[in-house]
Amino acid sequence: MVTTVDELVARARAGVHRPGPAEAFAAVAEGALLVDIRPVAQRAREGGIPGALVIERNVLEWRLDPAGSHRIPEAVDHGVHWIVVCSEGYASSLAAASLRELGLHRATDLDGGYVAWAAAGLPTLSADGGLA
């Protein structure tokens, strides 16, 4: 069976609530954790989000699996509310689906990604790490 990437993204998003920037910002204030999976070159070009954990996509599952030996300290259990961020919200949908397969049932992604976050006027960091 052959599928397209668009079909794969659609399946990853099926039945999943994807918060927009304002809702994600509020969720972080209530304890959700933003995880920026963009590669370093993309973050350097676009900027960052203050307080977001930077975990590149290629190691994401290893860092967030609470049962894994390479987990980060924030990966305390399967109930952590993770909001994955990429540039425009496509790769993050696939990443969040993979996290849900690990049992991280509250994992989702930012609708519109970093681009939507910045366009909404929410806090960002410049490429040098200062507030933009």
Image: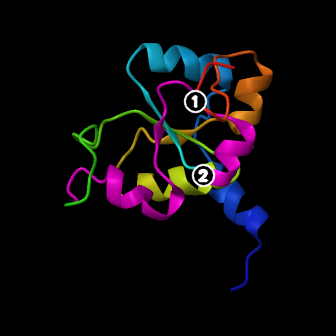
Residue 49: name its quadrant.
top right
Q: Is residue 62 left or right of residue 94?
A: left
Which residue is label 1 attached to?
129
Q: Residue 24 versus residue 104: which sits nearer the camera?
A: 24
Q: Position of residue 75 (x, y in %)?
A: 27, 42
Which residue is label 2 attached to?
40
Magenta stretch: includes residue 69: no
Q: Is residue 2 left or right of residue 61?
A: right
Q: CA distance from mark 2 to mark 1?
A: 12 Å
Name the residue located 68 percent from the left edge and 86 percent from the top edge: 1
Q: Compared to 52, does 61 lie above or below?
A: below
Task: Point out the stretch of residues depicted in magenta.
Answer: 40-68
Q: Position of residue 61 (x, y in %)?
A: 39, 59
Name the residue located 76 percent from the left edge and 30 percent from the top edge: 116
Q: Position of residue 24 (x, y in %)?
A: 57, 23
Asked whether the viewer can see residue 119, the reply is: yes
Name the residue located 59 percent from the left edge and 34 percent from the top edge: 17
Mark positioned earlier in the residue sequence (2 or 1): 2
| 2 and 1 marks in contact (CB < 8 Å) | no
Residue 87: name its quadrant.
top right
Three-letter amino acid code at the position of disc 1:
Gly
Q: Position of residue 51 (x, y in %)?
A: 47, 26
Three-letter amino acid code at the position of disc 2:
Val
Q: Residue 80 versus residue 64: which sits nearer the camera?
A: 64
Dot 1: element: loop
Q: Which mark is residue 105?
A: none
